[in-house]
Image: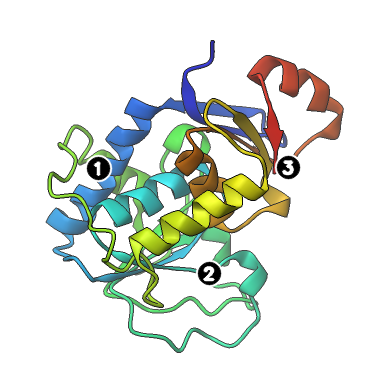
């Protein structure tokens, strides 16, 4: 039986990375410690997340929320649109290819992290000036206990004021609409599903596990369904 909570494939490189709930929890706690301890951010601080579906993205989002930080998600589909005119951000997490792209206007922040999304969380080969490499920065905090105070349902989860309770209810509604239930193993084509409410929070809220597939090779579809025990699709 597969005990991995989140599994990531990149069919272009052959990468497969899998994390159990406990292993993902270690990364989440480390990310929360990086933000709260090292960066000195507090509940109500704001994080900009410009990342695709990936296990490292899950660590960033869940770690920020564990620290009580409000998240502004901006998918690749928003590239080329008007820059974000919302409240100032305290930290940003950006996919490497989006830094310096003529299509992108990355919002500034006092703390800036870049993610090369290298296999296994390996260091990024090219870190732009003014940024820190997220995986090594978070790895320095691995083993830190998770936040003990948790978050309240009435606290804001996103910069637009959506509370954790409202966000959780929306995730549960998505899971219900997609037929996702406890024990399901959900296959996600990352090219077709950017929003973390759908690919991350809906399955987790329902008690399902996630298999993310980047650069999906359709010729491997049947084998992957069998080998991963897939029961639902996104």
| Residue 212 percent across, percent down from the top left | 61, 38
Q: Residue 215: which disc?
A: 3
State which tag comes first along the sequence, 2 or 1.
1
| Residue 139 vertical position relative to residue 225 in the rendered view, above or below | below
SS of the residue under disc 1 = helix
Q: Residue at x 52, y 30 (%)?
A: 182
State which tag comes first along the sequence, 3 or 2.
2
Can residue 124 be seen in the rendering of this structure?
A: no
Cα distance, mark 2 to mark 1? 23 Å
State which tag comes first along the sequence, 3 or 1.
1
SS of the residue under disc 2 = loop
SS of the residue under disc 3 = loop
Can residue 160 be seen in the rendering of this structure?
A: yes
Circle nearer the viewer, 3 or 2 = 2
Q: Look at the image and tell me in which quarter the C terminus lies.
A: top right
Cα distance, mark 3 to mark 1? 28 Å
| Residue 17 vertical position relative to residue 40 in the rendered view, above or below | above
| Residue 82 percent across, percent down from the top left | 59, 88
| Residue 40 percent across, percent down from the top left | 13, 63
Q: Residue 74: which disc?
A: 2
Cα distance, mark 3 to mark 2? 20 Å
In which quarter of the view is residue 16 placed?
top right
Q: Residue at x 62, y 57 (%)?
A: 194
Is residue 161 toward the left or the right of residue 209 in the image?
left
Pointer 1 residue: 30
């Amino acid at each position: 039986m597969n005990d991995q909570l989140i599994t990531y494939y990149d069919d272009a490189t052959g990468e497969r990375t899998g994390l159990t709930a406990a292993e993902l929890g270690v990364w989440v706690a480390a990310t929360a410690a990086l933000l709260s301890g090292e960066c000195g951010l507090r509940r109500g601080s704001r994080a900009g997340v410009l990342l695709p579906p990936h296990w490292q993205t899950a660590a960033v989002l869940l770690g920020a929320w564990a620290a009580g930080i409000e998240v502004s998600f901006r998918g690749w589909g928003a590239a080329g649109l008007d820059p974000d005119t919302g409240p100032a951000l305290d930290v940003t997490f950006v996919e490497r290819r989006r830094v310096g792209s003529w299509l992108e206007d990355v919002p500034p922040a006092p703390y800036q992290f870049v993610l090369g999304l290298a296999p296994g969380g390996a260091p990024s080969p090219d870190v732009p000036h003014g940024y820190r490499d997220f995986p090594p920065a978070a790895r320095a905090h691995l083993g830190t206990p998770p936040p003990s105070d948790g978050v309240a349902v009435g606290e804001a989860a996103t910069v637009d004021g959506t509370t954790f309770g409202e966000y959780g209810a929306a995730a549960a509604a998505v899971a219900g609409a997609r037929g996702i239930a406890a024990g399901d193993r959900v296959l996600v084509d990352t090219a077709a599903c950017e929003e973390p409410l759908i690919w991350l929070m809906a399955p987790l809220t329902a008690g399902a596990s996630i298999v993310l597939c980047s650069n999906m090779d359709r010729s491997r579809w049947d084998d992957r369904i069998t080998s991963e025990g897939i029961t639902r699709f996104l």
